[in-house]
Image: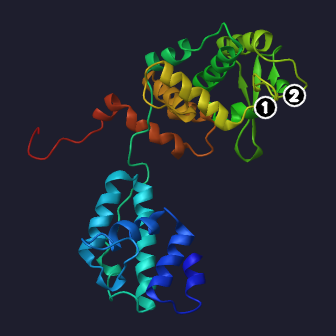
Amino acid sequence: MALKSLSKRRFSQQAVCDEIRTLWGPGIMGTVLSHTFAARPGRSGNDLNLRDVTGVEIMGFLQREAARLAVGSACNCVKYLRSFLRFLEAEGLATAELAAAIPPTSGWREARLPATLTPAQVAAMLDSCDRSRAPGLRDFAILTLLARLGLRAVEVARLQLGDIDWRNGEITIRGKGYRHDCLPLPTDVGEAIVAYLRAGRPQTDCRSVFTSCRAPIQPVSRVSVSEAVLRASRRAGLPTVRAHRLRHALASEMLYQGVRLSEISQVLRHRDIATTAIYAKVDRVALRNVAQPWPGGEQ
């Protein structure tokens, strides 16, 4: 959209550089201008000459960026830079065919294994909660919901007092797309919630199960839920863990215990079982049984 506004009239080289810095700031294009186009010895950040840019410099920039970016971000970097160079060529501000020097990127969906946790790591996070204090009681109940039911952070944040049917041992989950699902309420999850409601939740008219512990009393957000998980991971001495990692951990553990993918899909409330199928990649023992022998013998 920014390039479209630029192309309404012809710009000088410096005007383009100034406009790009204003529009993108320290983003990808700002990085290109600062670290690539002005990277030669004796050239300052304000002394730019876009006509001197070479394919070697473009490739050097992309290699540096790809080393620090995730696959999706690297693909976006290539896309933005290619569009920018094509704009410069159309305006006569850069040599022809610079955009052609940018190679295509490869990024396959679900190429990585789902990040997960071991049962011992999950237990360490739960044990790290100080249940003698209100914040610890709340965080323990939140983590128990995430770890035992595989809820999303936003689903925990949306949970209302009326969503829990104590008599029948059921809990209603407000999921994606205004979808409501009724799940069995495990005993340990119910006990964790009861302990929080009795001794940790402040007196308030708010109907959300989980609220802030100090005034102003308000419902927790999905960010607050994920931050509770992050704090627990740090106390347990683990690398950074967010809320969705506990959902992955539950699915992986169920798979290790021999639960079928169709049943895991029901627990996680996936609409398409293909979404659940990504967890089949973490069961390396089962995958060995279907792996084909290496041509020419064992390697």
Which residue corresponds to the image point at 73% horizontal and 16% vertical from the top-left?
A: 193
Disc 2 crowd rating (10 Å Cα; few below 14, some 14-19, many 20+) is some
Residue 201, compared with residue 286, is above or below; it is: above
The residue lying furthest to the top in this view is 132
Q: Is residue 288 left or right of residue 90?
A: left
The disc labelled 2 sits on which kind of residue?
Cys
Label 1: how many Cα within 10 Å (few below 14, some 14–19, many 20+): some
Whole-percent x, y for residue 151 in the image: 64, 31
Task: Give yes or no for contact between labels 2 and 1 (Cβ–Cβ under 8 Å).
Answer: yes
Depicted 109 relative to depicted 223: above or below: below
Q: Earlier in the sequence, mark 2 or mark 1?
A: 2
Q: Quadrant of residue 196?
A: top right
In this figure, what is the number of numbered marks? 2
Q: Name, please, the residue furthest toward the left.
A: 296
Disc 2 to disc 1, C-alpha distance: 7 Å
> Would you say residue 241 is visible in this rendering?
yes
- State the residue position of label 1: 219
Q: Which mark is residue 38?
A: none
Coloration mode: rainbow
- Residue ID for mark 2: 206
Amino acid at circle 1: Pro
Q: Secondary structure at mark 1?
A: loop
Looking at the image, which is closer to me, 230 or 262?
Answer: 230
Where residue 204 sits, quadrant-wise, is: top right
256 or 239, nearer to the observer? 239
